[in-house]
Structures are given as C-alpha cells and as structure tokens.
Amino acid sequence: MSDTADNRREIKARYLSAATISSAAERDKEYGALAGYAAAGGDFEHALKIADHVSAAAVRDSSYARIVHQAMTVGDFASADKAAERISSVMLRDEQFKKIAQSCPSNTTTDGAASVPGLENRNRAGALKRSDRTVGVHQP
C-alpha cells in the first residue's frame, strides 16, 4: 500500500471524526489542518473539498491560500487557480492571483487544460483582467 493511499485514508478518518465536533471553531480548525495536510501531500482536489466545509470565512480563506501556495510549489497552476477563485476576501484573492501570475513560467500558454486566467497565448503572465471585478472600484 502506498503512503499516499495511507495518508488519504488517515485524512478521511480524521475528517469524519471532525464532523462530529460540536464546536464550530474547533471543527473549522481541524478541517483547516486536514486541508493543509491534503495539500501538502499534493491531493489538491481533496484539500479543496475539505476546505469547502470550513464555516468561518477567515479560516476557510486561509486554507485556500495554503492550497494556492502548495499547488504553486509543485507547479500545479490550475489547482492554485481553483483555490484562489474560492477565496471570499477580495484583497486576499487578488493577492493570490497576482502571485500565481507572477510565478508562471514564461512558456505557460493558454493552449493546455491547466492554463491560468490572465495569461496571453505564448506570452509571459501579465496583469489579470477578470470580467467579474473592477480593480480600484469598491462596490457596496
């Protein structure tokens, strides 16, 4: 049996156990730790699923930011982008997108499935332009 399968099984057991914790703060803390463990093991989809269950926005956003960091460390820009998109804090989300864009290798293109929004085909990463946000304008 591989270490990855053993780690995933342990995380799943701890996740099921955490679901029974009555204190939302303690449950969120455990979910955040588990999302971090899954991300550190390179299982970003599992980490995202766990982080989605954190009820406190600050803890959830922190978990997503850790997933972004871990995914960028191994060069999985698509997973980093997925995690960054889920961050509810506009400032933290923009910071993560900026880090992703700045760390993309110069040969990254939008031709592949793992492309990052904001990249021009066959060009280095530039400023992200997202239709769902206007930079510098605060909306109520």
Image (cartoon, helix red, strand yellow):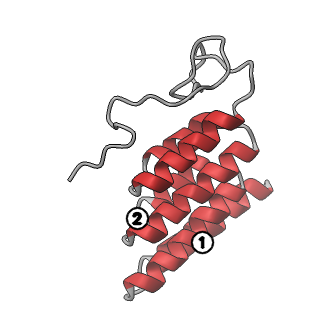
**Residue drawn at 45 percent across, 54 percent down:** 91
- When asked about the image quadrant of residue 112, the answer is top right
**Is residue 43 visible in this depiction of the protein?**
no
Please provide percent x and percent y for residue 134. Answer: 34, 37
Q: Residue furthest front?
A: 136
- When asked about the image quadrant of residue 120, the answer is top right
**Residue drawn at 69 percent across, 31 percent down:** 104
Q: Nearer the viewer, residue 29 or 58?
A: 58
Q: Circle 1 sits on which residue?
A: 33
Callout 1: few (<14), some (14-19), or many (20+) C-alpha neighbours within 10 Å?
A: some
Quick one: SS at disc 2? loop
Q: Circle 2 sits on which residue?
A: 53
Q: Amino acid at mark 2?
A: His
Task: Check residue 56 in the rendering and tell me which mark sits there, or answer none.
Answer: none
Q: Amino acid at mark 1?
A: Ala
Callout 2: few (<14), some (14-19), or many (20+) C-alpha neighbours within 10 Å?
A: some
Please provide percent x and percent y for residue 31. Answer: 51, 71
Distance from disc 1 to disc 2, alpha carbons, whole Å, reads 12 Å
Please provide percent x and percent y for residue 27. Answer: 45, 80
Taking the image as shown, residue 137 lies to the left or right of residue 107, namely: left
Q: Residue furthest bottom?
A: 23
**Is residue 21 visible in this depiction of the protein?**
yes
